Structures are given as structure tokens and as C-alpha cells.
Image (cartoon, helix red, strand yellow):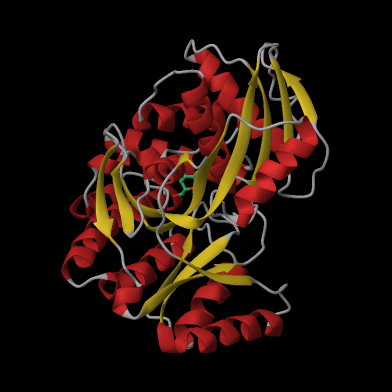
Amino acid sequence: MSPDLERLTATFGDAFGGAADGVWTAPGRVNLIGEHTDYNEGFVLPFAIDLAARVALRVRDDGVMRLLSTAGSESGITELSVGDLRSDRAKGWSVYPSGVVWAFQERGIDVPGFELVLDSDVPLGAGLSSSHAIECAVATALNEVTGAGLDAEELVLTTQRAENAFVGAPTGIMDQSASLRGRSGHAVFLDCRDQSVELVPFDAAAAGLVTLVIDTRVAHSHADGGYANRRDACELGAQVLGVKALRDVSVDDLDEARGLMDETTFRRVRHVVTEDQRVLDSVAALRGSGPAGIASLLDASHASMRDDFEISCDELDTAVEASRAAGAIGARMTGGGFGGSAIALVPDDDENRVRDAVLAAFAERGFGAPRLFTVTPADGARRLA
Ligand code: GAF
């Protein structure tokens, strides 16, 4: 048994007595490319990372949920009733398991009470999908213990429903899809219109590269207004162009689109339309020349998010610029934006130089020190024990 698992089962025993029925895990994600395209029914290319949430869970028959987290700053057991879940009553991290239970119930699935201990090594609020990792781990556990038998696509929609309607963040399906459907050594090329997935090999090490994450430690929340505002602009753009979603607009249509809407809406539309194309180009490049082939697409994606979609911030721009100047071959912010993390593709030999340069650039500009670490594509949600 791994030390993580030993610690989790020991904590479960101390908190609730005896053993859990099982332990389930679900990873966080980075998105290689394809940002704010998911809710426009477009394309994304994330991968599940080797940092994950784990839940030890045991069913109770009295409808009571008893929740304990060893991640984050909250302590103590939270007690809730599965028959009376309301988002305004769920506090802190318990909103995530509560939301999943609520979304299962909405599907007509009878969820019993349970005891649950969570731990996670996905940094919280870093734009690496720590909340979806919790939701996907809980959903995978409940899917098994209730015998619901939801398939991966249904689990994606159920956890999205938890996030949208219970947690209150109007997010798409990318993060859950990466966490539930990721595979070691691969990126998940997802068509968000029909949820079809192709696993595309992504082996940075074989190409002499690392995927460096630069967590700016600028906190963000998709329940704040910025994310919803961008989503509204995309919906307006699609409506003006008379299409179901921006997925149906091509780069060739952009010249004509410009005259049909205000400048800000046009720039939001241009980001999404060009980003969809960059995802397709990235998949072709990965299949052709491997990870190094996507470097310039990462740069172009960042510029588009900074200038057209306007979801970057000084810390993210600094992470990207400093890493590029010190030897990264391509870099971009990843995730919803307004904070969180950037990723940089860095030649092995330059990793220390890039790390030092990013730390120095943050210090010089008076920003708090970022957290730097490398990630590799890992397997998606599953039962661990
Ligand atoms: C967040 C959301 F949860 C995703 O659905 C996606 O929209 C992403 O921001 C931006 O690409 O991670």
C-alpha cells in the first residue's frame, strides 16, 4: 500500500472507526490547448495529471453524510443529510461532494448516507481543477456503491450539473472529461459537441522536454463574474452569426463577422474560433512531430487569451514571458484564467534555468513566489483499493 493510501485509511479509521468500503481517486488536469472552447461546443486537448484527489468512503444506511478533509485548511467532520442538500448550507469543500450527491439524486439515483475522508495533492485554486478532481472521485465512488452504472459520458454530465447548478460555476465539460477519461502517456482530444474522445500520445520526456507548471498563486473562482461574462459574449456572438455555437464558425468567416458585432464581442469570438483551429493543428502536430510541434501554438494561444479574450493577468504574463526568455520553447496560461497556472514546455537541460528565471521575474515585480513543478499525463478516475 502506498504511503498516501496508508495515511488515508488510517485517518478514516481514526475518524469513523473500522475500514472504508473502498478508496477512489481522480486526478486534476492541465489543458495543453483549447481554452474557453468547451462551452462553445468546440475542441480541447487537456491531460490528467499525476496529482489527484482520493476519497475513502463507507456507506451508512441512515441518510447521513459525514465528511472529513485532510486537504486545505478546514478541519473537523461536517455532517449533512442526503435528504436535505442545499448549496447555501454546504460550507467550504463539502459543497463538492454535496453537489455530486444532489446531481445523482436529480437523475433519480438513490444515494445512501456515507462517511468520507478526502485527501488531495492537487493544489487548491491553482487552475488545475482541484474541485473537479474531488467531484470526479466522489462521483466514481458513488457510481459504484449505488450500482448506478453511469458511463463516462454520463458521469461527465452529472459532475458538470453539480458544478453548474449546485456549486454555481457555469463551466463546461473539459475538466471532468480529463479527470474521468485521461490516460497515462496521452492527452485527451475531446470534441465537446458529442463528447467523442481520441487519446493522443504526449510523451514530453521522450522528446527531451518537461511540462513545467507555474502556479502563480493568484486565486480565482469560476463562480466569479469574469467566466460567466466571457460565456455570455460567446453566446451573443453565436446568436449574431446565426449559428448554434461558435464551433460552427471557421477562421475564414472572421473577416465578415467583424462588421456584424461590437469590437469586444468580435475579439471574444476571434479567440474561440482561432483557438479551436489551434487545437486541431496541435493534434496534427503531436501526431506528426511530437510535443515540440505544438510550441508555437501554445504561444499563439496565450497571446489570444491575453489580447482577445482578456483573461490573463500580470502574473500569468510574467510566467509565460520569463519562461520563454529563459529557454521554454512554448508557454501559455492554462485553465479558466484570471489567475491560476501557466504551463511551459521546457528542454530538460534548461529546466533549472527557467525555474530560476521565473522566480527572479516574480521577485523583481513584487509578486509572491510562484510554485513550480512538472507534470506528466496520468490515468483518469478509478478505484484504488
Ligand atoms: C475552467 C472550466 F471549468 C472549463 O470548463 C473550461 O471552460 C476552462 O475553464 C476554460 O477552458 O477550467
| Image location (x, y in percent) of residue 126 | 61, 57
Up-down relation of residue 111 to residue 312 (above or below): above
Decide if residue 321 is on the left or right side of residue 346.
right
Please tell me which residue lies in front, 144 or 334: 144
Q: Position of residue 144 (x, y in %)?
A: 47, 25
Residue, x 44% and y 18% (percent of image)?
A: 148
Q: Which residue is located at x 30 percent, y 45 percent?
A: 190
Indicate the position of residue 222 as horizontal and vertical percent values. Answer: 58, 44
User: 68 and 61: which one is in front?
Assistant: 61
Location of residue 86 by image quarter: top right
Q: Is residue 320 left or right of residue 209?
A: right
Q: Residue at coordinates 70% horizontally, 82% vertically from top-left? A: 363
Q: Is residue 92 visible?
A: no
In the depicted structure, whether residue 345 falls above or below residue 3: below
Whether residue 137 is visible to the viewer of this picture, yes or no, is: yes
Front-lying residue, 261 or 297 = 297
- Relative to 372, say whether 82 is above or below: above
Percent of width and height locating residue 297: 31, 68
Q: How many numbered marks, from 0 up?
A: 0
